[in-house]
Image (tube, grey):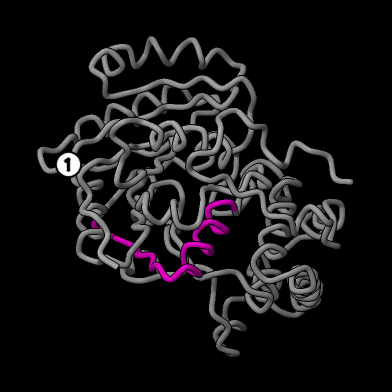
């Protein structure tokens, strides 16, 4: 397999009520236009309903006039994956389709050379389908950007809230150590470059997800098709995190538990990738860890036990048992029609 060199890149940014951040993101990327490859950008407004659809054409007027930015307002908030699909379908239907798609969240500002580093990585590793950036917090510290795939074992450890137990029993954690490069299971969808050839191979995002785990499932498919995924620490991207969702690194910044759709997406991910029985096992493993964690908290001083009763209540409320639609793939393919509502909007039977 000898994929084409990266000569054309289309960046995709999905805005949801963060129009000023999206404009800042677009301008930072515009400054990275290169003589070695062509880059353009599609900025999508995901049915924000806050005036973003009117503001963004003004904020990005000069970049739109230059042909660098194409603005696409969507009437509904169909979720992260669906909105990205709408942009990718448009890009791949053009007379000059891109060799790679650069997913970039609106709350991200790529540092100089960030995109070039990702392009270089794909060209250096022909079987690499996805290259992901190192996200950097506003204070300059590194944050989670590269990961191993979720498992029932690390769900137990996550529920327990004691990483030392995972190390003791050699349970592979979800997080790859910050700043560590090389081949990984998956990378953050906040800033990553994906070969179009891989998307033609396995499809785009599954629209059964509203938000969260959609990029994990896509990258699981890519990995399963024989491609590799790599983390590139020299591609640095400043990241506010949670600007649209109120969540950062998988944690709620405003509530005691994650929102229901996080648990629903997690359940769907396990059902699609490992089967319904494994999905149930993973939830039971987390619950067992959380309950043991509360017992240990009576013995172990400090706040190291992260799981809460609110998390357990939200998990039960969202449903532990796998539903039929959780196991039904809803993968968009390049060439599919635009505007088809996402699968998650259909009620379960």
Q: Position of residue 136 (x, y in %)?
A: 36, 50
Magenta residues span 214-234
| Residue drawn at x 47%, y 36% as measured from the top left | 89
Query: Which residue, as the protein is rendered here, is positioned at the far right?
Result: 349
The image shows residue 91, relative to residue 348, as above or below, that is above
Query: Which residue, as the protein is rendered here, is positioned at the far bottom?
Result: 169
Answer whether residue 298 is visible to the viewer in this image. no
Q: Position of residue 70 (x, y in %)?
A: 37, 22
Q: Residue 211's quadrant in the figure?
A: top right
| Residue drawn at x 45%, y 59% as measured from the top left | 144
The reply, left or right, for residue 138 in relation to residue 122 is right
The image shows residue 237, relative to residue 88, as above or below, that is below
| Residue drawn at x 34%, y 50% as measured from the top left | 193
Q: Callout 1: 10 Å neighbours few (<14), some, many (20+)?
A: some
- Secondary element under disc 1, as helix, strand or loop, is loop
Residue beneath disc 1: 37
Query: Which residue, as the protein is rendered here, is positioned at the far left?
Result: 35
Q: Position of residue 290 (x, y in %)?
A: 76, 70
Answer whether residue 158 is visible to the viewer in this image. yes
Asked if residue 217 is among those painted magenta in the image, a careful observer would answer yes
Q: Residue 10's quadrant in the figure?
A: top left
The reply, left or right, for residue 9 in relation to residue 57 is left
């Amino acid at each position: 397999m000898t994929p084409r060199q990266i000569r054309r890149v289309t960046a995709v940014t999905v805005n949801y009520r963060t129009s000023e951040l999206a404009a800042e993101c677009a301008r930072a990327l515009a400054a990275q236009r290169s003589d070695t490859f062509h880059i353009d950008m599609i900025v999508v407004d995901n049915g924000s309903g806050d005036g973003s659809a009117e503001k963004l054409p003004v904020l990005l007027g000069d970049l739109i006039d230059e042909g660098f930015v194409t603005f696409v307002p969507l009437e509904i908030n169909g979720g992260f994956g669906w909105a990205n699909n709408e942009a990718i379908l448009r890009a791949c239907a053009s007379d000059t389709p891109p060799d790679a798609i650069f997913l970039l969240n609106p709350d991200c500002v790529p540092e100089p050379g960030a995109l070039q580093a990702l392009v270089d990585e794909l060209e250096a590793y022909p079987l690499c389908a996805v290259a992901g950036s190192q996200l950097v917090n506003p204070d300059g510290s590194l944050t989670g950007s590269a990961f191993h795939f979720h498992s029932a074992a690390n769900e137990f450890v996550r529920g327990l809230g004691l990483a030392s137990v995972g190390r003791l029993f050699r349970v592979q954690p979800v997080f790859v150590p910050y700043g560590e490069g090389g081949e990984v299971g998956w990378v953050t969808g906040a800033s990553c470059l994906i070969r179009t050839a891989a998307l033609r191979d396995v499809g785009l995002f599954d629209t059964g997800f509203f938000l969260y785990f959609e990029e994990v499932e896509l990258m699981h498919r890519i990995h399963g098709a024989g491609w590799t995924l790599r983390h590139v620490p020299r591609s640095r991207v400043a990241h506010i995190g949670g600007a649209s969702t109120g969540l950062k690194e998988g944690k709620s910044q405003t509530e005691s538990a994650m929102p229901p759709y996080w648990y629903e997406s997690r359940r769907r991910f396990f059902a699609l990738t490992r089967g319904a029985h494994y999905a149930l096992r993973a939830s039971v493993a987390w619950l067992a860890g959380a309950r043991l964690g509360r017992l240990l908290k009576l013995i172990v001083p400090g706040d190291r036990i992260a799981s809460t009763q609110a998390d357990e209540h939200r998990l039960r409320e969202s449903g532990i048992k796998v539903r039929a639609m959780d196991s039904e793939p809803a993968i968009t393919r390049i060439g599919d029609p635009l505007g088809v509502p996402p699968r998650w909007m259909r009620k379960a039977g």
